[in-house]
Each structure stands twice: as structure tokens, then as C-alpha cells.
Amino acid sequence: MMSTIKTQTATSSGRSSVSSKMAVKKKKGGGLANQNLLHALLPGAKLDKKNGGKISVKMGISRDIVVFNVGGTKFETYRSTLRSQPNSPLADDIFLARHYNEDRKEYFFDRDPDVFKAILNYLRTGELHLPSFICGPSAREELLFWGVSDDIIQRCCWSHYNSWNSTLEALMQLEKDRKGSLDEVKSSKGTVPNKWNRIQSKLWKILNKPNSSLMAKVYGYISLLFVLISIASFVIETHPVFDNRERILKAEIENTSQYMTSSLSSNSTNSALNKTLNNNSSGKQEAEYVTVKVTHPAFLIIDVSCLIFFTLDYIVRIVFARARCRYMTSLMGVVDILAIVPDYVQFIVYAIHPEMRYDGNINYIAILRVARVLRIFRLIRHVPGLWILFYTLKSSFKELLLMIVFLIVGMLIFSSLIYFVDDRETFKSIPHSFWWSLITMTTVGYGDMYPVTELGYVVGSFTALSGLLMIGFSVPVLVNNFIMYYKHLEFAIIDEEARDEEEKDEEEDNSDDVGDDSVCNNNSSSNTEEVKLCNGEEKES
């Protein structure tokens, strides 16, 4: 194998280009050329396959060696290497002169040596590779200082670099949304809060931070107790043991409805009431009773008590909120209003139409009763993991949407296949087969629909396998996001508790200083009085 090295020296830049052209030795049937491995391993080696496997190597031959001391680590390179990128600060003599140490004859930079090593290799080879152990935001700051854009990072290192930065951005957005949901608005520095601002801040901490003080813990437990009682009342009310039924006159229900609809006419109202009394008093007609289900009085008392507490809680939060619009439109504000609106709507409807309380089949009344279950979301203030769960679903919307798309595609394909290869009595149509494909892909399998033919077994097997792959591809992303957010929330809570303790200590120190100043002033005034008495001066009576 023959090789030649061509060296060209440029006097203006002090650089040379060493080119090595390899002879090609082909095997039977063709193949790649055998290259000179020693030349290919040189720093800055470039292989040009279009030009007959030519390897060009750029290397500095100038004797002007530059010494850098970056964070205690020394680097040596040619000055010509620094000028390979004219736009870089390292090619600027003025920039280097500001950091030159005359005593040690070196350039000193108090920066990260690992990133500088990568940048120096970039100036030598033209490719930017970053170590995987360096934090992305820290590397970005270093690249910004050295005037290197992060767009030129190679693909092999871009995933690590981008994952660090995307994680930081996600955590910053998490902290912003968390503080926004709790309406945490800090006062600007240098401003002295007035009495109302101090009261507002203390009460807001009591309402939203159960661990901030003893009073906040007591109120937090009380609020949690009302939430649990309200949910328990909603659930237990449907049990057959608490099924409360009463026998009432059917005419009473009908006349109540007629009375409410004809209340605009007093004459018709009086005649309807007189007719009802006459019918009830006369023994000629047999009264017709009906059995209806009504709310147990104990549950009614519990619902009214919880409604009063939640209403007062919401009003107090609005009054003492530092940003009322932000609180009302935040997640917690929406949860608070949803906890009380259904009950008020139900009471208004029953006040207008009392006969509806005896009819449990009205759709929108049933929906209003179901809306009471939304009170469970008030536990978000007491269980941070519950808020993280909802935030994970919100921030992972793209992954969830992709999973839904995979599911829809799989449902369409496998429901069509099972319809044409299996029993038509079980799988009546392709839309009927959607239910089977959905249950099979999610690995639930209720057993109400199942294939009975051999081809149906094959289709069912592939349906289950595709469902496993779909879950395996999408679920780990949600799990990783939840773990990342939950760990950050734990750290944020610990950090906030430490800051609150520091603020309490500072307030106690300030109060002690004020007390010492007042004592000193009293002592100084008493001393002046003693001096006056010693000088023959009398105190004024």
C-alpha cells in the first residue's frame, strides 16, 4: 500500500495542510478501500470518499505556543489553532490581553476546564463534542462565554445536552405554575409592607400552607375534615341502609307543581288550594299515596354545613388574595368554585320546582349531584402528589395524544380484521368490534366478546401484542415525568420550609433588637435625669 503526504505551509496564518492519498486495493466483487489508519487517527483528519479516499489533516506547525490556565488546569496549543475560528473570542488579541498573566506567562480564566477542553478540540478538529456528565445549563453558559453556538454540537452529544436543558425548562415551568396556583406573589424589595399587607400575608399562609404555623395546621386539618365528611356523605347516601323513603299524597305533588306554575294568578291559586283541601277532607274519594325517595335529614344537615364552610372559605380566599383574578382562574380557584356551585344550583332548582326533589330520574339534577365528587380535588392542597399527578398529565399531553393515536389506529385495523375472519354473531359490525379491540389492546379483557375461529385467535394475539408495545412505548415517558416532578416538589417544599424558618429567625432577631434599643433609650434618659439631679437641677413636677 502506497501513500503520499503533501504538506503546504501558509506564511500568513502559520498553518499547513497535510494531505494523504491512499491507494485503493479492491477485493473480489468490490469493496471499500483500505485506508492508512495512522493518518486517519490524526486530530483533524477528514476523509473525502468522493475524491478517491483522500485524507486531509489540518495541523499547526507554528512555534508560537500559547499556554492557558483554565480553572487550575493548564492547556497548551498553537496560536494558529486559536485562529481557526475568526469569530471566536480566543482569536481576539484584545480579549486575550485582558486575561494575560505577565508573571506566569499564561492566560488565566476562572472557568470550567472540561468545557474548555471540548472547545479546544473543536478548534482543532472542527467538531464540538461535550462530555455527558456536564450539566446542560452550565455547558450553555460556558459556550456563551467562549462565543461558541450550541447549534454546532454533534448529534451524538446533542441528546444529553438537550435533555439537561429541557429538564431545567420543565422544572422552571413547574415551579411557576405551582406558585401561580397558590397565588404566591412576593413583594418587591425595598418596599415596607403596611399593616394590611402583613395581615394579608399571614392569613394567606394559614389558608394555603398548612405547615407554616400551628394555626395553619389546625385550619388545614379542619378543612381536610370537612372535605372527607362531604365525600363520605355523598358516597354513603347511596347505600341501601340509608335509603329513606316516605309516603305522600300523589295529589300533593301534582298540586304543588300546579301551584308553582300558576303562581302569577292569585285567584287560580286559591281555587287550586281549596280544591285540594276539599278532596283531602272528603271521605268519598280514596286518597292515593305514593312512595318516594327523599334525602335523609342527617345528610341534609351535613351537606348544608359543608356548603357553608366551603362558601366562607372561598369568600375569605378572595378577600385576602393578593391577585384575585389570578386566584380565581388558577387550578385551585376553579376547584374551590366547583365545590360549591352545584349545591347552590340544586337548591335554586328545588326552590323553584319543589316537585323535582321527589323525582330522581331528572338528568341534569343527577349530574349536579355527581358534581359533588369534585370536592375530592380540594385534597390537592394537602396531598402534593395529587397535584403532581394532574400536572404530569397536563405536561405530557403530547405523549398522551400520541398514545391515543396509536390506540385509534390499532382499533381500526384489528376491529376490521376480526370482523371479517370471525363469527358475525359476536362481532356484528366493525363499530361493535371497536370495544373488543380497545379492551384487548389495553390488556383488560372482560370476556364479553372473544374470537372463536383460528384466524380470530391469530388476530387476537397480534392485537394483544400491539397493545403491549403501545403501553411499553408511552407509559415510561409519563412515569419519568412524574418521578422528576415529584422529586423536585419534595426539594421545593423542604427549601420553602427552611426559608420560612430563616424568616422567623430574622423577625425574632429584629424584635429583640427593637427591645434592646428601647431599653437603651430608657437607660440613657434615666442617666440624663440623674446627671441633672447631681448638678442641682430639679425635675419638673
Image (cartoon, helix red, strand yellow):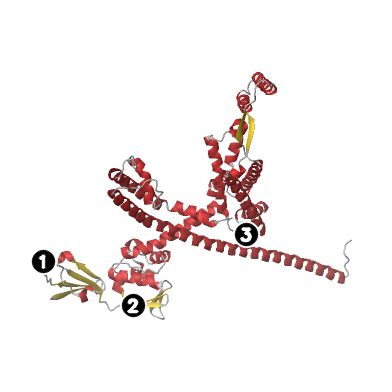
Marks 1 and 2, the one that precedes in the sequence: 1
Residue placed at 54% from the left, 42% from the top? 370
The residue that appears at 43% across and 73% down in the rendered structure is 110
State how far apart marks 1 and 2 are (Cα).
Answer: 48 Å
Does the rendering let one see residue 182? no
Residue at position x 63%, y 45% from top?
A: 306
Which one is closest to the eye, mark 3 or mark 1? Answer: 1
Q: Earlier in the sequence, mark 3 or mark 1?
A: 1
Q: Name the quarter where the C terminus is drawn.
A: bottom right
**Residue 149: quarter of image:** bottom left
Which residue does the numbered mark 1 point to in the structure image?
29
Amino acid under label 1?
Gly
Label 3 – label 1 distance at C-alpha: 79 Å
- Mark nearer the viewer, 1 or 2: 1
Marks 1,2: beta carbons within 8 A: no
- 129 is higher (above) or lower (below) than 328: below
Amino acid type, callout 3: Ser
Quarter of the image containing the N terminus?
Answer: bottom left
Choose between 51 and 163: the one closer to the eye.
Answer: 163
Secondary structure at numbered mark 2: strand
Q: Point out residue 274 in the picture as x, y percentages from the top left corner.
A: 68, 20
349 shown above or below 42: above
Tell me the element at label 1: loop
Q: Residue furthest bottom?
A: 103
Label 2 belongs to which residue? 76
The label number, if any, that marks residue 212 in the structure image: 3
What type is the residue that disc 2 sits on? Glu
Q: Are marks 3 and 2 in contact (CB under 8 Å)?
A: no
Place of residue 515 in the rendered image (x, y in percent of width and height, measured from the top left): 73, 65
Q: Residues within 10 Å of mark 3 (few under 14, many from 20)?
A: some
Question: Quick one: label 2, few (<14), some, or many (20+) residues within 10 Å?
Answer: few
